Amino acid sequence: MTLSSARLLDPICAIARQAAEVILAVYAQDFDIVCKDDNSPVTAADLAAQRVIEDALRELTPNVPVISEEAVVAPWAERRTWRRYWLVDPLDGTREFVKRNGEFTVNIALVEDHRSILGVVLAPVTGDLYAAAAGQGAWRQRTPDDAREPLRTRVAEGVLRVTGSRSHGSGRTKTLLDRLGEHETFSLGSSLKFCVLARGDADIYLRLGATSEWDTAAAQCVLEEAGGAVLDLAGRPFRYNTRDSLINPEFIACGDPAIDWTSRLIDPEDPA
């Protein structure tokens, strides 16, 4: 029997909290940092969380494959046949983990027919958890003992609030954001940028440069179920596992999809 995304949500929240426990155990002590082939860092916390999540997912849904940042990815010839699979970043924001600023997350998404239909984003340091399933809305739980608060994005009006990456940025990003007119900016690490949009505390997150599909899938579901959207720079909704590469296109995450953000940011005569 195939479990619905709604029925899977609570077990996935529990798995994310289990992963957070092993992450925090490493976070509390000295740890080594290794650079992968793409020069991104990896720590014992990434690998420990990977093992916890992958083992739990295989027990929960033994017939559903898993793609994870810290595991060998199946070849495209195999992946292209998948209708349903898990997409995981066991520790999103390893650079923030290394800086010990607390702005890192556990991301677990269920993708079906190229759409993220379940998403859980958990910040281990604070215990703040964001979760959503397709058609079920999105909610936030600040600690395991707190009530679940429904999430809703806000209408974009007045001075816009723009969130961006703590560890990545460019002059091109500033050039495009200047086209919005008056706005205020603040930085956050990991998928928390999507979460502040989902809870109505920001309006837009523009990401230029490379991200991977496991960086966005869980948070996209949360944001969409809260009323927002994640779009490429042509205004098309994000889809997953549609080609060999797992690198995302550049994107706009927004709280108010009624705004034509592409037209406001991208000048076809001067694409920056």
Image: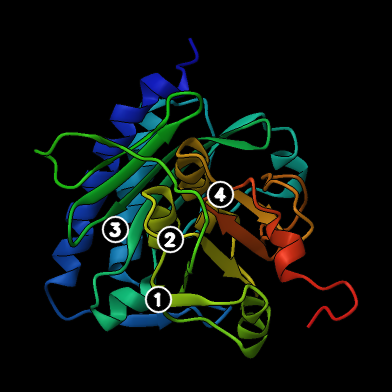
Seen at 9% across and 38% down, the residue is: 145
Residue 72 shows in this picture: no
In this view, which residue lies farthest toward the left?
145
Mark found first going from the N terminus, 4 or 1: 1
Q: Quadrant of residue 161?
A: bottom left
In this view, which residue lies farthest toward the top?
1
Where residue 116 sits in the image (x, y, percent)? 56, 38
Could you classify mark 1 by the number of other residues whose Cα lies within 10 Å: few (under 14), some (14-19), or many (20 or more)? few
Q: Which mark is residue 14?
A: none
Local SS, label 3: helix
Mark 2 is on which residue type? Ala
Q: CA distance from mark 2 to mark 1?
A: 9 Å
Where residue 214 sits in the image (x, y, percent)? 53, 54
Q: Are marks 2 and 1 in contact (CB under 8 Å)?
A: yes
Mark found first going from the N terminus, 3 or 4: 3
Q: Is residue 43 left or right of residue 63?
A: left
How many dots with numbers? 4
Question: Nearer the observer, disc 3 or disc 1?
Answer: 1
Seen at 17% across and 62% down, the residue is: 24
Q: Which residue is mark 1?
A: 186
Q: Which residue is mark 2?
A: 202
Q: CA distance from mark 2 to mark 4?
A: 10 Å
Q: Is residue 225 left or right of residue 128?
A: right
238 shown above or below 101 = above
In this view, which residue lies farthest toward the front?
158
Seen at 19% across and 68% down, the residue is: 26
Q: Is residue 103 left or right of residue 36?
A: left
Mark found first going from the N terminus, 2 or 3: 3
